[in-house]
Amino acid sequence: MIFDDILGLARSAGAMAEGWITPPVRLGVTGLSRAGKTVFITALVHNLLQGGRLPFFAASAQGRLIRVFLEPQPDDDVPRFAYEDHLATLTSTPPGWPESTRRISQLRLTLEYEPLGLLRRQMGTARQHIDIVDYPGEWLLDLPLLRQSYEDWSQDAIAQSREPQRAAFAAEWHGFLAGCDSAAPGVETAAMQGAELFTAYLRRCRSEPNLLSTLTPGRMLMPGDLQGSPALTFMPLDVARGTAAPHGSLHTMMARRFEAYKSHVVKPFFRDHFARLDRQIVLVDVLSAINVGPSALADLERAMTAVLQCFRPGTNSWLSSILGKRIDRILFAATKADHIHHTSHDRLEAILRHSVHKAIDRALFAGAEVKAVALAAVRATREIEAQENGEALNCIAGIPLPGERLDGQTFDGRQEIALFPGDLPPERDGTVTIPEEGAGVRFLRFRPPAVRMTGFGARASIPHIRLDRAIEFLIGDRLE
Ligand code: GDP
């Protein structure tokens, strides 16, 4: 009896110690808009809560995961990730895709598990909090601005807007700039009109079918809570590097706002949120970029280089001075792999790996463990084989979203179709060459799968591709 009590005491003390001592893992989930952040988090949380099929997530496969539940998040000043709303949309009839990430949000998930070590097992079950932090990848691209003066940034932004793949989208803003006297008195109407045209140019670069990635300032594309704020009412002016801004001029006004953007928007995000992350997944819509062509893919690589620089900034930079701990694992994930047949998944992964390695070389990056994976957080298609002229074709089948078009046909959102998505170009000598006109993959947006209810009102797990491998890499070692 006494023995039982002592053991019980030891167990609860152990559990408490685990709760107190095991520090939470802060897992950042990022990626440019439409990369798949909201879908990824919703599917990840649902699969963990419901004990979904996760054979490559060791704690789950070994039967050591005892209980998973949501808890109130620890930070009162960050909105909660709207998990229940997103899941309701995803599992409604007919199922729909949830609303995408527009600002930072957070969710705390607690995993109760049986530790691997004999000694720790004696202490009873252990608990690990996972704080999932969802934020727009566009915000990471702002880090280089901290090292730039307004005039440097202006020159770079204008030069970039004159590149062949961008110039047409910037025509209206260039027209405004040509008639703009930077030494004239700074008036609000000119600032507002210029900022609006500049933002419209950035949006056109980012939107389909262009899908460019390296665009700053990030908040102009993804304003979060700053929508319509004066902090975003600025634009580059054609002013030479090192020029002194005349007192009271438009130049002075824009330079002041640029500095305010850096100190009141960019720095607080890196200091209050980014610097506290332990692990990071960067979701990348590689398929859409390779479908546009090599220029969009090259631009995506540039964006990945900028993202990597945030994780290992130079030793003398402002960011390195505030980074208390370092992110030790970064996973780059090519999303929406269910749009292609599994025979092309390795190629998709190879293209991503190749791009990431180029970014690693360019960012002179070393330190954290970096991995690349091709996944689909939600598998919206199934695979079938079709015959064409006696030849077997690897096809996918799914229900295209209403209004999707292909070969002159518009889909109604109800009928399932079989599609030969095409093959990704093969890897040769470590490189993958994307043809100028795009990879030729037939890309349709499908409805999410119908998630059937199983007994006692429980929901079946959401089908996925390699979500479990991503979870294992990101948190597996913290559950040993
Ligand atoms: P966010 O802007 O990064 O939050 O992107 P979302 O998570 O909202 O995803 C954008 C869109 O991509 C969704 O509405 C879906 O159409 C599509 N999508 C995202 N993840 C998947 C996936 O795993 N499979 C499929 N088929 N489509 C996906």
Image (cartoon, grey):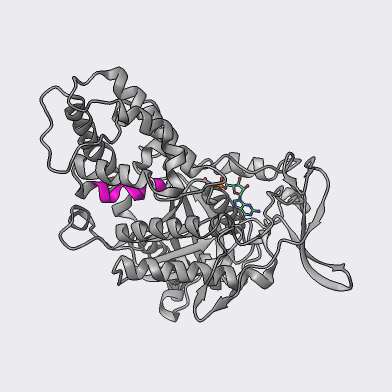
Q: Is residue 330 left or right of residue 238?
A: right
What residue sits 60% from the left and 74% below the top?
426
Give the percent coordinates (x, y) of residue 372: 48, 69
Percent across and percent down for residue 188 are 28, 19
Question: Where, by quadrant of the figure, is residue 413 drawn?
Answer: top right
On-image quarter of the C terminus = bottom left
Q: Observer-nearest residue: 158 or 62?
A: 158
Residue drawn 49% across and 79% down?
430
**Residue 177 seen anywhere in this rendered image of the structure:** yes
Q: Quadrant of residue 153?
A: top left
Q: Residue at the spot x=69%, y=56% of the render?
A: 442
Q: Please determine whether, in this image, residue 118 is positioned above or below residue 75.
A: below
Q: Position of residue 388 (x, y in %)?
A: 86, 67
> Which contiguous range is marked in magenta?
137-145
Residue 105 found in image quarter: top left
In the image, 2 versus 34, the foreground residue is 34
Q: Return the x and y of residue 95 as percentages of the image width and height.
A: 72, 43
Q: Nearer the viewer, residue 310 or 118?
A: 310
Is 90 above or below relative to 472? Answer: above
Q: Residue furthest right?
A: 390
Helix, strand or loop: magenta stretch: helix
Residue pictured at 71% horizontal, 49% vertical: 446
Q: Is residue 304 left or right of residue 315?
A: right
